[in-house]
Amino acid sequence: MDQTFGALADPTRRAMVAQLLTGEASISDLAEPHDMSLPAIMKHVAKLVDAGLVTREKRGRTVVCSLNVDPLDQANAWLQQNLDAWNRRFDALDAYLARQKEEDR
Amino acid sequence: MDQTFGALADPTRRAMVAQLLTGEASISDLAEPHDMSLPAIMKHVAKLVDAGLVTREKRGRTVVCSLNVDPLDQANAWLQQNLDAWNRRFDALDAYLARQKEEDR
DNA sequence: CTTATACTTAACCACATGGTTAAATCAGAA
DNA sequence: TTCTGATTTAACCATGTGGTTAAGTATAAG
């Protein structure tokens, strides 16, 4: 979870995730949209790999990267769970206020 | 977005968010579950504040912190959007494979 | 007025992050 | 084999992160 959220905390890496959403990409494909040196790109990719979001496969002299959405799913689940709890809290508050209003009559 | 995901990339801070989900809490309330010095706690809270996830209000000599879920909502939206795109991609692939199978007859 | 409580600030530390340039490897093409 | 393109490694740099201890400030309570 730490690594997943950490990986998503950078715009370059979020862009890479979005790019990989449309299909596989080589390292240089991933580098192309970003005005940045190759080594810098490599480090970003490495973080995505460490977070389990990306898998690398060496094909000839190029490396093909593809997305694994499982960590995204988990992160999403955490957020959803918390937002749900938040909403339940306010639903309970609303119910309480409605009951109070009823008693005022 | 960077700051939101960055804030969530630490277990201590995620625990704080979860705690604040149940209602307001003072700095020492937030510190209590964690075996950590007050200054360390302060830094975590500061990050949550910077990310817009938490608001602080000084009440007497204590500071009351409360949660703001808007950034969580945005983060959730980003993830959901990406997961949706991913699923559409596979739906399209499934449809294609079904069509192929049809043509094989 | 003094003291205890709640928080803050300052100063420091080791290590991580996000970037660079320059040089090295590795595999396909000529 | 030699050239070329794709990636990698090494070394370096500035800044950020996550923690510490020690000392400071501010406010409620005695």
Image (tube, coloured by chain):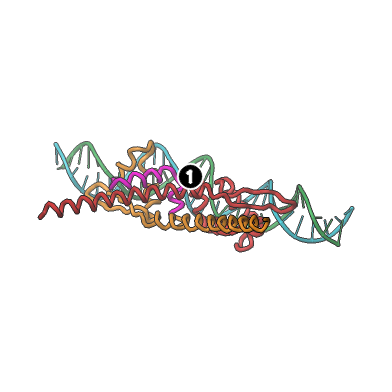
Chain colours: A red, B orange, C green, D cyan
Q: Residue at x 26, y 52 (%)?
A: B58
Q: Main secondary structure of the magenta part?
A: helix
Question: Can you give x and y, in whole percent of width and height, for residue B102 in the image?
Answer: 63, 57
Chain of the residue displaying label 1 = A
Q: Residue at x 30, y 42 (%)?
A: B29
Q: Residue at x 33, y 50 (%)?
A: A86
Question: Can you give x and y, in whole percent of width and height, for residue A104 in the image?
Answer: 11, 54
Residue B14 part of the magenta-drawn span: yes
Q: Which residue occupies the foreground of this view, A65 or C4?
A: A65
Amino acid at the residue labelled 1: Met
Segment tinted magenta in the rendering: B4-26
Q: Which residue occupies the foreground of this view, B40 or A59?
A: A59
Name the image quarter holding residue B36.
Answer: top left
Relative height, residue B92 to residue C13 (above, below):
below
Q: Circle 1 is placed at which residue position?
A: A1
Q: Which residue occupies the foreground of this view, B24 or B57?
A: B24
Residue A104 part of the magenta-drawn span: no
